[in-house]
Amino acid sequence: MKYDIAVLPGDGIGPEVTEEALGVLEAVGKKFGLEFSIKKALLGGCAIDATGHPLPPETLELCRSSSAVLLGAVGGAKWDNLPGNMRPEAGLLGIRAGLGLFANLRPAVIYPALKDASPLRSDIIKDGIDILVVRELTGGMYFGKKGRYETENEGTAAFDTEVYSTQEIRRIARVAFEAARKRKKKVTSVDKANVLESSRLWREVVTVVAKDYPDVELNHMYVDNAAMQLIRCPEQFDVIVTSNMFGDILSDEASMITGSIGMLPSASLGDGTFGLYEPVHGSAPDIAGQDKANPIATILSVGMMMKYSFGLDDAAKEIEDAVSKVLEKGYRTADIASEGTRIVGTKEMGRLIREAISG
Ligand code: IPM
Ligand code: MG
């Protein structure tokens, strides 16, 4: 069996962290006798520079003809003043929508070795944190009608529309309930139903879907309260399901309580096994090219690819275990360093994890 993987390194630290993740992929391939065929393409700022467009048609084509996509990160100050639909981020949104990837899974797990890196007190973290944020990815305000218009007396006005259909809510809710079944069987649906009509529909539909999952406990929470509860008592959460916008915000928050956003992978899935895998973090232009970035989020994204797109659970576990081993030995990139640990660069971290896999 040969696996075709499209790789989109992107901008900033994207290429560096992707390179290390590809090294890990190679090590896993050797260990398990798997053949991966890698093809690279442009997305984001680098694509704008080379072709004038953040998502060139050939990139989308390559992704469509692959079994999975590995993405680094996109964006940077250089492209910040371009119009919205020509920014690197538009390439990312275009690829999510263009590939029908409506479900974004963002696991926030605290590694025992990294307890000290969390900004939360140990009496709050207790035995650890293991939350899965299921973020709707192709709807809501990100894709609703948006625009600007001139008013008579108040200058220019601008708007973005939060819109969700029953079908969109239903399918993301199902993903969350299915995931919860394999975990602690608890779903928290996050909305702003005390104010937003779209949230009231969200709550209604999620409640109906829950009837098909009597073994899973459902509760609803307003997003402001959820932001607070994540810090006050993270252990109450198992699976969080929420809209594109709220999921963007809460997944950054959830990642930070685990110690560093540099640790968190994500999977974006549609109806089948095809998926796009990327770190939750951005392109971090301030440290790009300095061998400082943490490659672990991208490496763990490869792990998620093994599991969700290829059904290679052993390979996924091998990657996760290798990361744990290296952390337990005390190696850290700067973002997760604490007293008594050894700081290494991007390349060295990649090498250590590869070695843990081969060894
Ligand atoms: C993310 C990022 C993106 C988003 C940006 C870069 C468009 O923040 O993947 O969370 O908002 O979805
Ligand atoms: Mg984000």
Image: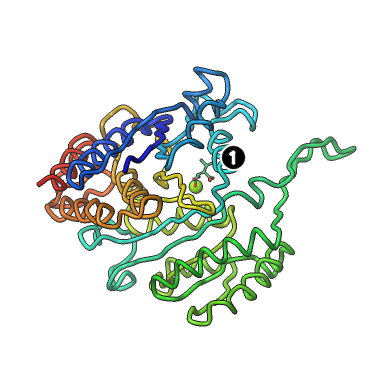
Which residue is painted at 45% across and 53% down in the image? Answer: 252
**Please, what secondary structure does the residue beneath circle 1 have?**
helix
x and y percent of residue 226 in the render? 52, 67
x and y percent of residue 125 in the render? 32, 69
- 322 left or right, relative to 43: left
Quarter where residue 185 is shown = bottom left
x and y percent of residue 160 in the render? 71, 46
Q: Who is closer to the viewer here, 145 or 317?
A: 317
x and y percent of residue 10 in the render? 43, 30
Quarter of the rendering occupied by the N terminus: top left
Q: Who is closer to the viewer here, 26 or 290?
A: 26
212 relative to 353, above or below: below
- 236 left or right, relative to 172: left
- 47 left or right, relative to 36: right
Which residue is painted at 14% across and 51% down in the image? Answer: 330
Which residue is painted at 53% across and 32% down in the image? Answer: 60
201 relative to 31, above or below: below
Q: Residue furthest front?
A: 1
Q: Residue furthest bottom?
A: 214
Quarter where residue 12 is shown = top left
Q: Who is closer to the viewer here, 219 or 5?
A: 5
The kind of residue tagged 1 is: Gly
User: Looking at the image, how many numbered discs can be counted on the residues?
Assistant: 1
Residue behind mark 1: 98
Q: How is the image coloured?
A: rainbow
Q: Who is closer to the viewer here, 82 or 297?
A: 297
Q: Residue furthest right?
A: 152
15 relative to 313, above or below: above
Q: Is mark 1 within 8 Å of ligand 1?
A: no
Quarter where residue 90 is shown = top right
293 relative to 302, above or below: above
10 Å neighbourhood of mark 1: few (<14), some, or many (≥20)? Answer: some
